Image: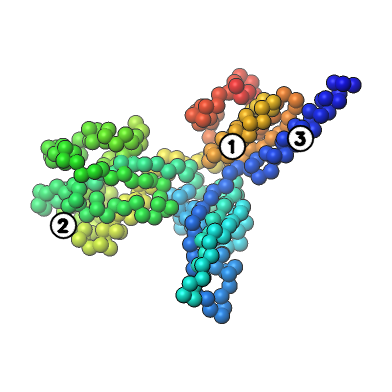
Amino acid sequence: MYYQKHLYIFFIVLALNLSFFSTNKVNAKAFLIDEIEISEKLENNFNKDILINKGFEKAFKQLMGKLIQSKDLKKTKSIRINEIKSMIETFSIKEEKFFNKTYSLNLGVSFNKKKIFTYLDTKNIFPAQIIEKKFLFIPIIIDQSKTDLLVFSNNPIYQNWKNENKNKYLINYVLPTEDLEDLNLIKDNYLELENYDFEKIIEKYFLENSIIALFFKDKNQIKVLSKIKIKEKKVIKSNSFKDIDLNKSDNLEELIESLKIIYEDFWKENNLINTSIKLPLLIQVKNKDFDLSSKFEETLNKIDLISNYSISKFDKDFIFYEVIFNGTPTNFINIMNNQNYNFDTQKKTWIFK
């Protein structure tokens, strides 16, 4: 009788604990798009709901810009507002202003990740993990008509490669300082810049990712040789641009924008999520430590490759999770190892050590 009474109390406490992480937290995490600013003149036909809908459209467009490659953006342009709203989990109006007969809003919009991925799946689009990274960026202009080298302050690309529209890009560019030693290194290797590894310059910035962009300028034609390094992976990309006058601000902006899109697409390509792979994994976690299961769920929520997860059952010793993963078992183990989680994978149900 004593044992039954305490067992009954145990399951009541466990059920109460489970209620704290069996609501929205069990669903895959949301994509939060913040600081959406929209405004409209206050006229007789002003409608706040219509303005908020414009904010939702702007937020969705911004999310797509970060989530998918530029070649796929056209597939999402015809989406209707009702479909966008069906994928919104929550939104908040962070600020409202009335000034000079204009009404302004600052919105935060949270999209349901599972619904977004399902939508992209219907469009045959693979999303990318939203991973923001710093890249060292060194642009060098080789003016072939003058046999001239433009590196720092006399280089219009270096001067105008700003980190504006940070919400638009995943890559955060770090430009080198005007170091005389670096300048001399580049000049000394002028004739073999295409083969020079730039490691002596790169190592000063302690960044594992870098882009060395060589701009070969011949009148109004520019060939860009981009030496991209992502950790230990090295790739060379070549792109050509015609009718570009670097002295014209609109031409310069167009060139910079085009290159940033190329680099973003390459970064996304390295982090694509194959949503057609839906690998079910069964994992058991000790339930005696509520913090342990709570932190485990927080970790699952942060991983974009996890499509969804749920609690399939529980007993007095373990909570059993079913995780749907967009990848291979080895990939999952590696990602979780990086988060300091290890598993015994000998049986069908993996045991969290």
Estimate the x, y position of residue 51 in percent, counting from the top left: 55, 68
Judged from the image, the secondary structure of the residue bearing numbered disc 1 is helix
Give the label on residue 15, or none.
3
The residue carrying mark 2 is 219
Dividing the image into 4 quarters, which one contains the N terminus?
A: top right
Q: Earlier in the sequence, mark 1 or mark 3?
A: 3
Residue in view at x 48 percent, y 72 percent? 99
Task: Give yes or no for contact between labels 1 and 2 (Cβ–Cβ under 8 Å).
Answer: no
Q: Is residue 343 above or below residue 141?
A: above
Residue type, numbered disc 1: Glu
249 shown above or below 336: below
If you read the primary sequence from the N terminus, does the residue marked by circle 2 or circle 3 appear first?
A: 3
Q: Residues within 10 Å of mark 2 (few under 14, many from 20)?
A: some
The image's colouring method is rainbow
Distance between the Cα atoms at labels 1 and 3? 19 Å
- In screen coordinates, is 192 left or right of 254? left
Task: Judge by depth and name the residue closer to the eye, 109 or 313.
Answer: 109
Percent x, y of residue 259: 31, 51
Report which residue position mark 1 lands on. Answer: 298
Judging depth in this view, the residue of 319 and 266 nearest the camera is: 319
Mark 1 and mark 2: span between their CA atoms? 55 Å
| Kind of residue sitting beneath label 3 | Ala
Decide if residue 352 is on the left or right side of residue 240. right
Q: In front of the other: label 1 or label 2? A: 1
Q: Nearer the viewer, mark 2 or mark 3?
A: 3
